[in-house]
Amino acid sequence: MYHMIVNPASRSGRGEKIWHTLLPVLKKNQTAYKVYLTKGTGDAGRIAKELTSDPSAPAKIIILGGDGTINEVLQGIQHFELTDIAYIPTGSSNDLARDMCLQTDPIQALEQILKSDSIVMTDIGCLTCNNGYYSLSGDYVPGVHTRYFHVSTGIGFDAAVCEYALTSKIKDTLNHLSLGKLTYLGIALRLLLKGETASCQITFDGTDTMQLDHLLFAAVMNHRYEGGGFMFAPDADYADGLLNLCAAHKLTFLRALRILPTAFSGNHLHFPEIRSGKSSYIQIKTDRPLCIHTDGEVPFHADDITITISPCKLRLIPTNL
């Protein structure tokens, strides 16, 4: 039995149409399945929690959506060791599929999933907000809070781009024109004009500290890409038990225009304004609360976060065979 979590709103509403194209494949293969159509934020996580709540019952979940849909599912999974995940990418950025070279044609992806007996074990990152956070509505929520991610998490500019993309009509317009990859680039250029930065302290493994003034953003990567194709971590490996940091500071608008395009090919790391590092434990403190994202989802603003890695935690059914 396959449990199919479908985000019908992915790719500006085309997710539902794509789902209907898969029905003949399921019928042809006489596949036993149940489908769950999400209706809003948090639905995918709640569904995944229900499907994986029994500690004695393995579950096979096929996700049809974007990186954000996978992120929601991760928050809900109760027993990772009993849960097999497959992914049919229908989002606008699809950085997970890009890095793992997963099949992007929905029909071919489903056919490979149904005939596959392989599992790829991948790492999962965990973001911890250490000292409370501010919700997107501005309310302060005290305490320690955690959230999983698969592709990346980030604080500052890259998260602000995600926040803007989630609330802007630009993303839907470009998706309708089949230009979704330009969404994040266009928003990034707009936000760069504001030039908002912060002072930042980044600590690796609890000992090695990096002090950065005028931080634009700090992205912590499990995969190579984020934001629709920016290769912020060219040597990231989703199964090495390590996180890759890419931080940008002291960037003028003109320098940002020079450097950011090189990140599509991973050639940005040699610029002095870009700092990098690798660790299984990274703590980031800023002098004011900044926007934070996990896999393009924006849960809060905070000024003290810790990012850790859980090696080989997720069981993924590959579609790149």
Image (cartoon, grey):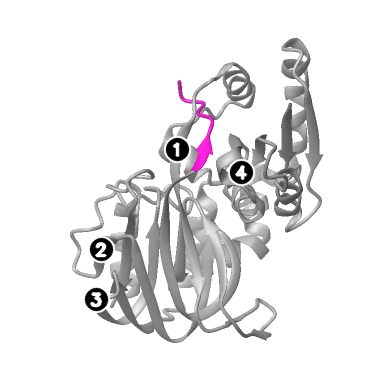
Q: Quadrant of residue 317?
A: top right
Q: Position of residue 224 (x, y in %)?
A: 37, 48
- Circle nearer the N terminus (2, 1): 1
Front residue of 98 and 183: 98
Question: Which segment did they paint magenta?
Answer: 314-321
Disc sitting over residue 276 in the figure: 2
| Relative to 265, 133 lies left or right | right
Amino acid tagged 4: Gly
- Circle nearer the N terminus (2, 3): 3
Front residue of 277 and 213: 277
Q: CA distance from mark 1 to mark 4?
A: 23 Å
Rendered residue at 73%/23% (across/down): 22
Q: Dot 4 corresponds to which residue?
A: 91
Disc sitting over residue 121 in the figure: 1
Q: CA distance from mark 3 to mark 4?
A: 38 Å
Q: CA distance from mark 2 to mark 1?
A: 26 Å
Q: Is residue 239 magenta?
A: no
Comparing marks 3 and 4, which lies closer to the viewer? 3
Q: Quadrant of residue 139?
A: bottom right
Q: CA distance from mark 3 to mark 1?
A: 29 Å
- Circle nearer the N terminus (1, 4): 4
- What SS does tag 1 mark? strand
**Vertical position of residue 18 compared to residue 210: above or below:** above
